[in-house]
Image (cartoon, helix red, strand yellow):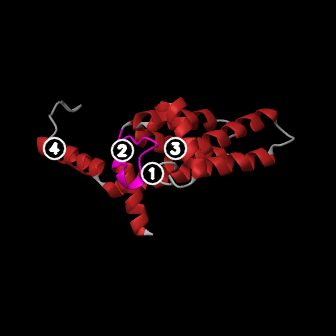
Amino acid sequence: PQCRSGAAPPPAAMEKCCECLSNVRKNPTALIILKVYTLLSGIFLLLAGLLSMVLHLVTSFSQLFVSTYAVIFGLMVVVVEHGTWLQHVAVLRDAYALLDREFRLLTVQRGKGFFYTGAGIMTLFVDNFSIIFGASLCLIVAGILHLFRIVHEDPVSPGDKPAAGGAAGAAASGAAAGS
């Protein structure tokens, strides 16, 4: 590939960049960080939606409507990201099984990336620089990281045990070992 100046980039720099990205994609710690960041983004969106619902309960129907979407999207993110880690919690296990059956797109990494990015964009410009705006930005970043598979995550079915669930199971066992 040519640079704007017409000179080719040094091959060693390109190889080093690809090698670094490859190491990050395979790193189990990076997967745990991604899952925790995404989970916190979902919780932030959920709480921001609830706060916005309370603040705009009688003032703005459109804001109340979007706040409801923020709460629903936040709950879905929490179930998708946390449902595979806490299989012993019946509510999360059942909700994850429902999403796996009805919205299969949310159980694969790129599908989650599309959903998180789309949900973030949908709630982004509701109210100028509100708390939902901040939560939406966090969710968009998480969506982009999933969409482009910066960190590789193996798909997990709802019947898998957390310890045997591929990268998500490794992430769960790594998180349990860290606590």
The label shown at residue 153 is 2
- For the residues labelled 3 and 1, the Cα–Cα distance comes to 10 Å
Dot 4: few (<14), some (14–19), or many (≥20) neighbours within 10 Å? few
Quadrant where the C terminus sits is: bottom left
Residue 76 screen position, x and y as percent? 58, 41
Callout 1 touching callout 2 (CB < 8 Å): yes
Residue 110 screen position, x and y as percent? 41, 34
Q: Quadrant of residue 6?
A: top left
From the viewer's side, name the closer residue of 81 and 121: 81
The magenta-colored residue range is 149-166
Q: Earlier in the sequence, mark 3 or mark 1?
A: 1
Which residue in the structure is indicated by mark 3? Answer: 80
Which residue in the structure is indicated by mark 1? Answer: 35
Left or right: residue 66 versus residue 43 is: right
Kind of residue at badge 3: Val
Quadrant where the N terminus sits is: top left
Kind of residue at badge 4: Glu
Residue 137 screen position, x and y as percent? 55, 44
Q: Residue at x 57, y 48 (%)?
A: 92
- For the residues labelled 4 and 2, the Cα–Cα distance comes to 23 Å
Dot 2: few (<14), some (14–19), or many (≥20) neighbours within 10 Å? many
Dot 3: few (<14), some (14–19), or many (≥20) neighbours within 10 Å? many
Farthest-out residue, bottom: 179
Kind of residue at badge 2: Glu
Which residue in the structure is indicated by mark 4? Answer: 15
Q: Earlier in the sequence, mark 3 or mark 4?
A: 4
Any part of residue 79 in sight = yes
Left or right: residue 18 versus residue 61 is: left
Any part of residue 77 in sight = no
Q: Residue at x 52, y 38 (%)?
A: 116
